[in-house]
Amino acid sequence: MAKRGDVVIDIEKCKGCEVCISACPHEVLSLSSEVNSKGYHYAVKVNSGCTGCANCAIVCPDAVITVYREK
Amino acid sequence: MSENLVNPENLVYKKTDAMTDRVLHYCPGCGHGTAHRILAEVIDELQIQDQTIGVAPVGCSVLAYYYFNVDMQEAAHGRAPAVATGIKRVFPEKYVFTYQGDGDLAAIGTAETIHACNRGENILVVFINNGIYGMTGGQMAPTTLEGMKSSTSPFGRDVKSMGSPLKITELVAQLPGTYFATRQAVHKPANVRKAKRAIKKAMEYQKHNKGTCFVEIVSNCPSNWKMTPVQSNEWMEENMFPFYPLGDIKVPEK
């Protein structure tokens, strides 16, 4: 089984461009229905399928995603 | 449970310290942010943060000096390679890079770009090509594709009256002073990794005093292309990449 991972998203800096959503191989991310203080819908984790591959963080133009993976 | 994964020993990726904590002013989904980040990561990985001097351009990335946590200098429009030449000649042991868009590098700064490369100045030129003038409102740039609509070519670029798109990377690759020229993209994880490797290689070449390294990054402009970021990345793959093929254009001889 793949290792488990987790992402922490800085929602105040997220601009909701959705590039991370299309980059995630496990469809872990989605756009929130809420907006942040700038009025952007932000990326949120919607299931526990994250493997910590960091693809989302690597394509994030605003560097808002921090990735963790169990050792 | 996922909560207990979030601790420093499990960390695999976080924003590099070679970038400041300022919120980027770029539009959502703009490739500039990713390009900034990989360049900053390279600086961090090579541990040259205190030995690097960057030159910021005019254009969308005019505020690049706010985001890189290294010494930065702003240049007049298009003159970044000339300013970088001066910096590198005064401080030959420093790592000097310019970060320029297509309007800056391929239009107003063509002379500076070509002559800096022709002199073989030992600098890294990072060139972001999105085929349009972003900051000023989506006017046609030299790199705008044939038939591509912009605010000054609303019926599409007509090569008969407006000339053909300029492949500046191929052009500078012809010059003997250019040591390494490559074209990359930053829209997908694999491309980001490749682009980062290319920038790292180019930065390392500066140690050997061999000549100008030129890294073009084909990027998107969701706002001025009038698309969502994901659509603009797809459009870029379908339309930009056939004309601006990715890959190394000039590699050092072994």
Image (tube, coloured by chain):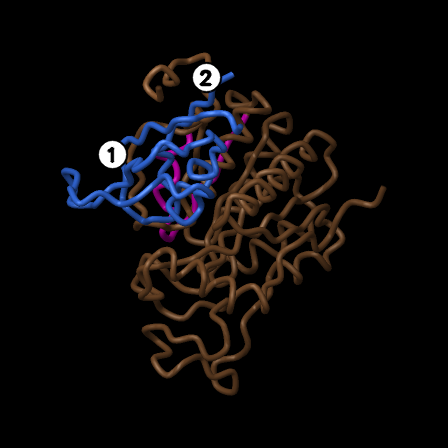
Chain colours: A blue, B brown
User: x, y (%) of residue A2?
Assistant: 52, 29
Residue B204, image quadrant: top right
Q: For residue A11, which numbered disc appears in the image?
A: 1
Quadrant in which the N terminus of chain B is drawn: top left
Residue B207, image quadrant: top right
Q: Secondary structure at mark 2?
A: helix
Q: Mark yes or no: residue B118 visible.
A: yes
Is residue B87 in the magenta section? no
Q: Secondary structure at mark 1?
A: loop
User: x, y (%) of residue B176?
Assistant: 76, 53
A33 with respect to B4 (left or right): left
Q: For residue B10, which numbered disc appears in the image?
A: 2
Amino acid type shown at disc 2? Asn
Q: CA distance from mark 1 to mark 2?
A: 21 Å
- Outermost residue, right side: B254
Amino acid type shown at disc 1? Ile
